[in-house]
Image (spheres, grey):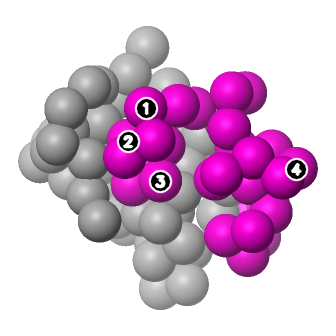
Amino acid sequence: MQPTDGCLADWRDDDECAPICLEAGRAEWEERCQVVLDCYGVNDCNESSCGSGEGVCGNRLGVDSAARDIARNAYNCICL
């Protein structure tokens, strides 16, 4: 599911920031980064509000720390 509103709506179309996630250098990082950003967008949250521990976009996504770091950088570029 992809976000439809908020700062992450259509984030894949952001020519400046989307490549941080979409061209991360390893296919698994790119896939997992997209999962994290889409989760943040759909749930209208971010790393600090739902992305750690047992948060809705936290450990249950099964995403490694490298992909989370990439997602954080992309989120900061897109939303801040």
**Cα gap from disc 4 to disc 1, whole angstroms:** 17 Å
Residue 58: quarter of image: bottom right
**Cα gap from disc 3 to disc 1, whole angstroms:** 8 Å
Residue at position x 55%, y 84% in the image: 28
**For the residue carrying disc 4, how many other residues have a C-alpha within 10 Å: few (<14), some (14-19), or many (20+)?**
few
In this rendered view, identify the residue nearer to me: 58 or 26. 58
**Cα gap from disc 2 to disc 1, whole angstroms:** 5 Å
Residue 41's disc is 2
- Find residue 38 and report its horizontal and vertical position in percent: 39, 54
**Cα gap from disc 3 to disc 2, whole angstroms:** 5 Å
Q: Which residue does the numbered mark 1 point to in the structure image?
A: 44
Q: Amino acid at mark 2?
A: Gly
Relative to 67, say whether 76 is above or below.
above
Q: Quadrant of the C terminus?
A: top left
Q: Quadrant of the N terminus?
A: bottom left
Asked if disc 2 and disc 1 are in contact, CB closer than 8 Å, the reply is: yes
Q: Which residue does the numbered mark 4 point to in the structure image?
A: 53
In this rendered view, identify the residue nearer to me: 14 or 1. 1
**Magenta stretch holds residue 50:** yes
- Find residue 75 and report its horizontal and vertical position in percent: 47, 35
Asked if disc 3 and disc 2 are in contact, CB closer than 8 Å, the reply is: yes
Determine the secondary structure under disc 1: loop
Q: Which residues are magenta?
A: 37-66
Q: Which residue does the numbered mark 3 point to in the structure image?
A: 39
